Image (cartoon, rainbow, N blue to C red):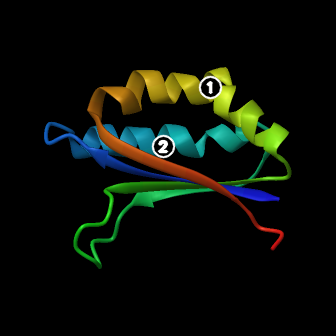
Amino acid sequence: MLRHVVLMNWTEAATGEQVAEIARRLRELPAAIPEIRAYHCGDDLGVNPGNANFVVTADFDSVDDYIVYRDHPAHRKVIDELIAPILASRTGAQFSLDG
């Protein structure tokens, strides 16, 4: 099993409404992509200074399942139409949950 983690920072021009719509649309992805085993996203709570603005975590049974998600048209649509226009920076990583 693997976990995919993405940390994003928004541009200064990003609005709360835009970010809320991104979260709403991302949370719809598990219904469209059965390869997703667990999916969470949300705004940083502001506990520590310097954190990213937003995080996504997703769990998959295999690398192949992650790739299905990565390239899925529903996922790409959220990225291209909603995230990319307000994205200042992004960092991602995938790691094994099996030890």
Say few, some or many: other residues with alpha carbon within 10 Å of mark 2 (under 14 / 14 to 19 / 20 or more).
few
Q: Nearer the viewer, residue 70 or 18?
A: 70
Q: Residue at the location (81% across, 74% down)?
A: 99
The reply to whether residue 32 is in sight is no
Pointer 1: what residue?
74
Inspect the image, locate mark 2, and give the three-letter code of the amino acid beneath it: Arg
Q: Position of residue 42 (x, y in %)?
A: 44, 57
Q: Nearer the viewer, residue 92 or 25?
A: 92
> Which of the image's four quarters has the N terminus?
bottom right
In the displayed structure, does residue 58 sit left or right of residue 90?
A: right
Q: Position of residue 19 (x, y in %)?
A: 33, 43
Q: Residue at the location (37% across, 28% down)?
A: 84
Inspect the image, locate mark 1, and give the three-letter code of the amino acid beneath it: Ala
Helix, strand, or loop for circle 1?
Answer: helix
Q: Quadrant of residue 18?
A: top left
Q: Which mark is residue 24?
A: 2
Q: Quadrant of residue 30?
A: top right
